[in-house]
Image (tube, coloured by chain):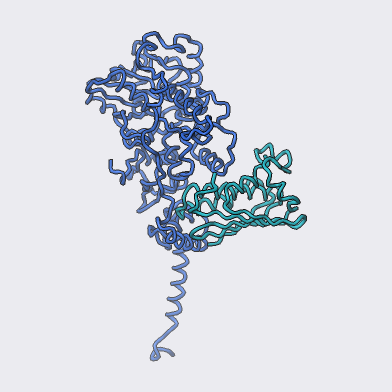
Amino acid sequence: MNPALPFHSVTLDSERCVGCTTCLKKCPTEAIRVRKGKARIIDGRCIDCGECIRTCPHGAKKAISDPLSVISGYRIKVALPAPALFAQFEERFSIDRVLSALLALGFDEVFEVAEAADYVTEATRFLAKASCLDGDASALPRPIISSACPAVVKLIQVRYPSLLPHLAPVISPMEVAARIVKERIHAGEEGVGVFFVSPCAGKVTISRAPLGYARSSVDGVIGIKDLYVPLRNALAQTPERRLSRAKSSGLQWGRTEGEAEALGERRSISVDGIANVIGLLEALENGKLKDVAFIEANACPAGCVGGPLIVENPFIARTRLRNRAAACVGNPSRESLSPEVANSSIAPATRESLMELGWTEAVKARSSLALDADMLKAMIMMEEMDQLVTTLPGLDCGSCGAPSCQALAEDIVRGKAVETDCIFKLRENVRELAGRLLALEELKPPGLDR
Amino acid sequence: MKYRYVVPGDDFSRAGKASSEIKRILGQLGIDPTMVKRTTVAMYEAEINMAIHAGGGVAEAEIGPERIAITMRDEGPGIPDIELAMTEGYSTAPEWIRELGFGAGMGLPNMKRNADELSIESAVGKGTTLRMTIYFKKAEGGV
């Protein structure tokens, strides 16, 4: 990957885009500009939250994910279903049946991301304890912010760099699941392909350009919506096999509050929806959340079940996931690991192996905010910008292609737009020009002046 | 560069706008995030104080290449004993403010912790002027 050209899952379908301003206004990082009638994404600012996908009335914003055919190049094909997958189907189809149907689609094995989520919970709990110890240099500042949602991590990189030290430096359940499959279950084997079945566009990006570690063990990310129809068709016909191992706590990760509940931290706040996440991070940056130990923040409404690659309504899905998890609690064979699993080397039960789940690379600020690297230059630009804003109409109409008058002023001082991109400024100019033309018309050569 | 904001005294939900504007500006100037955070926390506390105790006021910020100087001016009841007000845990905030998570008596101490320089002039019955300076490069005295 060329770091200068970040890969994004969220992209524009030019054919469908009519150049309206809907996505422009909704983008939480002001990463969209309409140019030549199309809503272009500014790569350096996009956090892959999928808000534009959710709001585009023309279906012109989409998330690129891998097709099912991506699995064909591998000898052993392993599906990693996200908990949100099970919430797409009515509860009469058991989790075992959904997993069996995945095998019917061509996968050789399944490994539930919900199971891996429990290990992430363990690692986070370990970190939370460490940060309580007085004088521990490696202690995280409170509250610890979950790093499971890639859009939230990127939002913090772009808009809240002062909060980066709060992020739990732990790899995500998807990555843990992929590593367990490759490094433990199939250690040393060739041709093992691991595929995340994803509700999330951000996971597509993060599997190709990871944050916190150098290389992802995930070989492909397939959107739930792309598997939905074939899976739905396979469900009725597939004989049910006992495949599911994940506990209720891991399943719950797919909806908001599930992660905090799994952690069992009473002083935690769970927030979902990118606008609400922004509100909470603002409060945190203002120094307001003093008695909070843990923040679970999900960019999507209702959590991962509200991801842009899902089919079912997020709130229906959330209830289903809750019910499915509750059903697990009543089933002792699921809540305690089966002997063959408990005795295998899969579960990272030791302190050392939990630390293997830690980040190996720092997640740094992505500075798209600064007007210029040279502060004096930035100050001059800022003054120019402040002046410009006072001359703009302040309607934030979006007709110029920028989300607000403030953003247009910023684009102008950055040399990416001109004042007459504002239709009101343009009209002012036209009127002034018309006045000058009329005045000119009044002037006649002496020979004609009678 | 100078900025001036009116902090409302009648709409508590809007208190915090001035500090969030300043935060945006400092971010766009490329100021170190730690310093931005210190400024935001100190200014936000001052804004909230103004809204709770003084019925609003005026916030002014002057930004130079090396520092930001903030002046918060109100015509509220004033602070009778500044030293006492600076004590952690000392609060005169009413109950409803405490229920909102404010008024723990940490406002002024928190400002002092985050600002490099802090001075308060206050006259009972006339009002309070609070001045804070935060230096962008200086790393000491932070949170």
Is A286 on the left-hand or right-hand side of B137?
right
Q: Residue at x 42, y 89 (%)?
A: A449
Image quadrant of residue A233? Answer: top left
x, y (%) of residue A424?
A: 47, 61
x, y (%) of residue B107?
A: 65, 45
x, y (%) of residue A56?
A: 42, 41
- The answer to whether B89 is drawn above or below residue A383 in the figure is above
Q: Residue at x 22, y 26 (%)?
A: A73
Chain the render paints cyan: B
Quarter of the image for the N terminus of chain A: give it: top left
- Please identify the residue farthest to the front as the structure is shown: A135
x, y (%) of residue A201?
A: 38, 34
Image quadrant of residue A215? Answer: top left
- The answer to whether A377 is drawn above or below residue A96 in the figure is below
Residue A26 visible from this viewpoint: no
Is A380 on the left-hand or right-hand side of A211?
right
Image quadrant of residue B101? Answer: top right
Quarter of the image for the C terminus of chain A: give it: bottom left
Chain the render paints blue: A
Is A282 on the left-hand or right-hand side of B98?
left
Is A233 on the left-hand or right-hand side of A307?
left
Q: Residue at x 51, y 16 (%)?
A: A326
**Front residue of B117 and A289:** B117
Q: Residue at x 42, y 12 (%)?
A: A337
